[in-house]
């Protein structure tokens, strides 16, 4: 067993907002793929992508989704971004690619879900619902009804990534939320997400039902509050380490570019959300930005490391 981390890079050039891969044999020590160059370069939509999601499908293929957005292209001369404009007049699509082997990819598709009232579609993630044998695609969006003032999590369903149900509200709070990540351990669904305020930090909630209601985990909130700049963590992704521990990766942003990227938090076992920061046991070739970790086979690892 090995691991694949699909991500993008934080750069002031468009080549950073593309699809990058890194791999690991142990989940702790990561190495770049393809010489640190993109494995996929966008040629449609905004010509860049962020918030990279990857899933192994039930037929043992792979689907990649990403936010169709290139922040570098909308920066001013001082590298400032009008985020309010971006989340109210952003892309109406998600970018999608397919692959059978993680080396060869289909052409970029722009997926439209049939809702013109979305201001943006950000940070998509895919969860396979075994009970109903379908994929839940969830993402952050604003809507015209409230003048794009309140980001919440919306979701649609698909069985084949060809036809999709109309997106409906999945999870919301009084304040804006984004960057949802769902995983199931035993009979419990774990929802991780970014709270924009009151307080601004990553949150965790649990439920016995995929569609909720979800119960807030106060313990993780209290731990996050002890960290330096807790509001600067986002983009959660989790995976099981070979030693049985559970890793929560959170993307730290808003500082010097060479210090931005994922920070690992580890608990003693999968399903135990008593996470603690653990930078010392991990190594990265550069700062990975908003992505997803999946398990891959040793053969897939060997194929990727030769790219």
Image (cartoon, grey):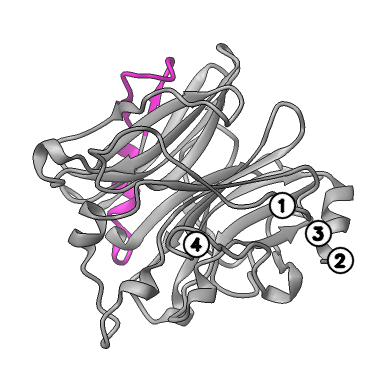
Q: Which residue is mark 3?
A: 304
- Helix, strand or loop at disc 3? helix
Q: Is residue 304 above or below residue 285?
A: above
Tag 4's secondary structure?
strand
Farthest residue, direction left: 146
The quarter of the image holding the N terminus is top right
| 245 within the magenta span | no
Residue linked to disc 2: 306
Q: Of label 4 and label 3, which has the lower sequence position?
A: 4
**Labelled pair 2, 3 in contact (Cβ < 8 Å):** yes
User: Is label 2 or label 1 in front?
Assistant: 1
- Position of residue 175 relative to residue 285, above or below, is above
Real-space Cα distance between discs 4 and 3? Answer: 24 Å
How far apart are the two marked residues, 1 and 4, measured between alpha carbons?
29 Å
- 119 lies left or right of 32: left
Q: Which residue is mark 4?
A: 263
Give the residue at mark 1. Answer: 105
- Distance of label 2 from label 1 (alpha carbons): 16 Å
Nearer to us of marks 1 and 4 is: 1
At x 21%, y 68%, the residue is 82
Whether residue 222 appears in magenta in the rendering, the answer is: yes
First of labels 1, 3 by sequence position: 1
Q: Nearer the viewer, mark 4 or mark 3?
A: 3
State which tag comes first along the sequence, 2 or 1: 1
Sooner in the amino-acid sequence: mark 1 or mark 4: 1
Q: Rate crowding at label 3 as few (under 14), some (14 to 19) or many (20 or more) other CA atoms within 10 Å.
A: some
Which residue is the extreme one toward the bottom? Answer: 77
């Amino acid at each position: 067993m090995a691991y694949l981390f699909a991500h993008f890079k934080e750069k002031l050039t468009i080549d950073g907002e593309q699809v990058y891969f890194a791999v690991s044999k142990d989940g702790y020590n990561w190495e770049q793929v393809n010489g640190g160059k993109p494995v996929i370069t966008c040629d449609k939509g905004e010509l860049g992508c962020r918030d990279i999601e990857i899933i192994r499908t039930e037929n043992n293929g792979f689907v990649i989704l990403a936010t169709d957005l290139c922040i570098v292209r909308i920066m001013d001369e001082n590298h400032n971004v009008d985020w309010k404009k971006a989340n109210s007049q952003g892309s109406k699509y998600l970018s999608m690619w397919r692959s059978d082997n993680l080396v060869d990819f289909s052409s970029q598709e722009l997926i439209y879900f049939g809702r013109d009232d979305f201001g943006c579609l950000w940070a998509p993630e895919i969860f396979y619902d075994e009970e109903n044998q379908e994929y839940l695609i969830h993402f952050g969006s604003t809507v015209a009804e409230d003048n794009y003032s309140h980001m919440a999590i919306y979701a649609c369903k698909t069985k084949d990534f060809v036809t999709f149900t109309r997106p409906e509200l999945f999870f919301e709070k009084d304040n804006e939320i984004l960057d949802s990540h769902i995983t199931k351990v035993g009979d419990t669904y774990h929802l991780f997400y970014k709270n924009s305020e009151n307080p601004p930090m990553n949150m965790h909630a649990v439920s016995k039902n995929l569609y909720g209601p979800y119960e807030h985990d106060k313990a993780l909130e209290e731990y996050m509050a002890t960290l330096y700049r807790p509001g600067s963590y986002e983009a959660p992704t989790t995976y099981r380490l070979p030693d049985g521990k559970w890793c929560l990766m959170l993307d730290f942003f808003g500082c010097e570019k060479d210090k931005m990227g994922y920070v690992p938090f580890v608990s003693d076992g999968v399903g135990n959300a008593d996470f603690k920061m653990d930078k010392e046991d991990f190594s990265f070739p550069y700062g990975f930005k908003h992505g997803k970790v999946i398990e891959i086979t040793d053969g897939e690892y060997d194929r990727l490391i030769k790219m």
